[in-house]
């Protein structure tokens, strides 16, 4: 059997398994589950066997889980021992270009550097500083909308989602789209309750929209100034529509789904910690930074990093990982590692814990990390100052959190504006 045939059969087998399996096996669900914003007990219990434990096997491949902070940083930073390109396991080709697995998170050098180099200029400090007025405008519009629909509103819908979605649409220079549809598709791309069966279809849908947008812009420039129009103007000769559309899709998805979860879950945490809420209302920028950084550590909505594949036999923590083994880094577990600091399970902005892994680490660290911080600082401060008496408008026991997802979130957060 040729290598191409083997890859094709393995890809087909995985897709059939994902689409026919009713759920992710119980034995490996716990890294993608939460108890509110806290890791489930089993994740902490796994530490008894060390910072690295074997989760199970996927199509005959051993899968390891990393929960220790120091080991996690080491794995994420080591692009020589570990590869991100998992397409050999699940197949590179889809029925259409939009269905092809890829993007920055699943590419290695030199492809990764080539693709990332397209986006980096749009996320420099100078470029981000130019976005502050746009962020302020989007935040104020969301707050006005909350006030207009008060005194009780769903913060997820009118603030958590509205702010990052508006910012990322402005950043990309996207025309008006059906926001409800894209919100639903974005969440479904991280939802594994049906064993990931919907991920392929929803990913293809949003990616195809952006591929088409790039193609239209290439044929007849018409979009407002933004990443899409600039990418086409600057790189049309070097990158095809699928590559540029895929990059835009990564910015679009990463720029709103994770930030939406962070704003909503972060507000829920803040409502339980009045002192931190007051720091946002009355504190100086340094106080605000303390709150935001602790929220990123404590909430960490992205539960696991992109999988890594061992390029050769390597020692990871106390384990020996063989060539071809897959490592899954639990960002949630690493951020709550008691070895990092004794009170890791508590939310405390006054305990400085530099080096959050909420945006990843190393070569594949999120290119939009600083934009996300800007959004969080601006949005949370404005929310706390506009509605200082904000409170939960339901029994906390009635809140519904995502059951099994790569990006954790809360489905709705009813609040009383006060």
Image (cartoon, rainbow, N blue to C red):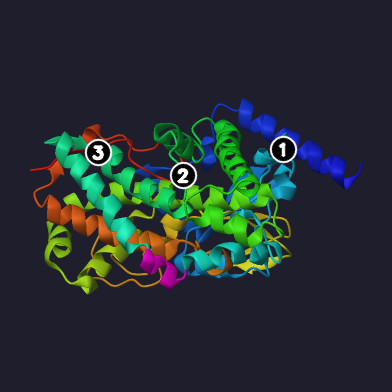
Q: Secondary structure at mark 3?
A: loop
What residue is shown with label 3?
Answer: 413
> Which of pointers 3 and 2 indicates the residue nearer the eye?
3
The number of callouts visible is 3
Inspect the magenta stretch and tell me whether residue 399 lies in it. Answer: no
Figure quadrant of the N terminus: top right
What residue is shown with label 1?
Answer: 94
Residue shown at 38% from the left, 59% from the top: 372
- Near mark 1 (Cα within 10 A), the count class, few <14, some 14-19 or many ≥20, is few
For the record, the magenta segment spans: 124-130
* Left or right: 167, with 107 as reference point: left
Tell me residue 378's x, y (percent).
26, 60
Tell me residue 49's x, y (percent).
50, 57
User: Which numbered marker is on residue 279?
Assistant: none
Residue shown at 23% from the left, 32% from the top: 398
- Near mark 2 (Cα within 10 A), the count class, few <14, some 14-19 or many ≥20, is many
Tell me residue 376's x, y (percent).
31, 58
Q: Nearer the viewer, residue 1 or 366?
A: 366
Quarter of the figure with residue 183: top left
What residue is shown with label 2?
Answer: 32
Q: Secondary structure at mark 2?
A: helix
* Left or right: 267, with 211 as reference point: left
Label located before the other in sequence (3 or 2): 2
């Amino acid at each position: 059997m040729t290598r191409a045939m083997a890859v094709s059969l393995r890809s087909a087998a995985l897709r059939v398994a994902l689409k026919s399996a009713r759920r992710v096996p119980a034995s490996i669900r716990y890294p993608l589950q939460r108890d509110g914003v806290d890791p489930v007990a089993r994740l902490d219990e796994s530490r008894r066997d060390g910072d690295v434990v074997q989760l199970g096997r996927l199509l005959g491949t051993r899968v390891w889980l990393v929960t220790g902070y120091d080991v996690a940083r080491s794995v994420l930073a080591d692009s020589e021992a570990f590869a991100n390109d998992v397409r050999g396991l699940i197949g590179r080709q889809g029925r259409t270009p939009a269905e092809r697995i890829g993007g920055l998170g699943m590419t290695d050098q030199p492809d990764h550097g080539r693709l990332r180099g397209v986006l980096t200029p749009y996320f420099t400090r100078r470029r981000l500083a130019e976005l502050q007025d746009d962020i302020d405008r989007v935040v104020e519009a969301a707050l006005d909308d909350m006030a207009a629909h008060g005194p009780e509103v769903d913060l997820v819908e009118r603030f958590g989602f509205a702010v990052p979605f508006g910012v990322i649409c402005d950043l990309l220079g996207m025309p008006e789209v059906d926001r409800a549809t894209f919100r639903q598709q974005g969440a479904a791309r991280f939802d594994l309750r049906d064993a990931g069966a919907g991920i392929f279809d929803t990913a293809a849908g949003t990616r195809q929209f952006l591929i088409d947008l790039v193609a239209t812009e290439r044929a007849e420039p018409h979009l407002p100034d933004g990443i899409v129009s600039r990418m086409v103007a600057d790189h049309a000769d070097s990158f095809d529509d699928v590559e540029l559309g895929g990059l835009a899709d990564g910015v679009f998805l990463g720029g709103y789904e994770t930030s939406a979860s962070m704003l909503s879950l972060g507000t829920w945490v803040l409502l339980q910690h009045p002192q931190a809420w007051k720091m946002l209302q009355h504190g100086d920028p340094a106080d605000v930074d303390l709150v935001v950084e602790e929220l990123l550590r404590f909430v960490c909505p992205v539960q696991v990093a992109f999988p890594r594949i061992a390029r050769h036999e390597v020692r990871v923590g106390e384990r020996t990982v063989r060539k071809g083994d897959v490592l899954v880094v639990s960002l949630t577990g690493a951020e709550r590692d008691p070895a990092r600091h004794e009170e890791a399970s508590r939310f405390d902005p006054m305990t400085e814990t530099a080096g959050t892994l909420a945006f990843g680490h190393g070569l594949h660290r999120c290119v939009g990390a600083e934009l996300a911080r800007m959004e969080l600082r601006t949005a949370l401060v404005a929310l706390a100052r506009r509605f200082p008496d904000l409170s939960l408008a339901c029994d906390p026991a009635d809140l519904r959190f995502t059951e099994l997802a790569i990006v954790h979130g809360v489905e709705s957060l009813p609040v009383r504006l006060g």
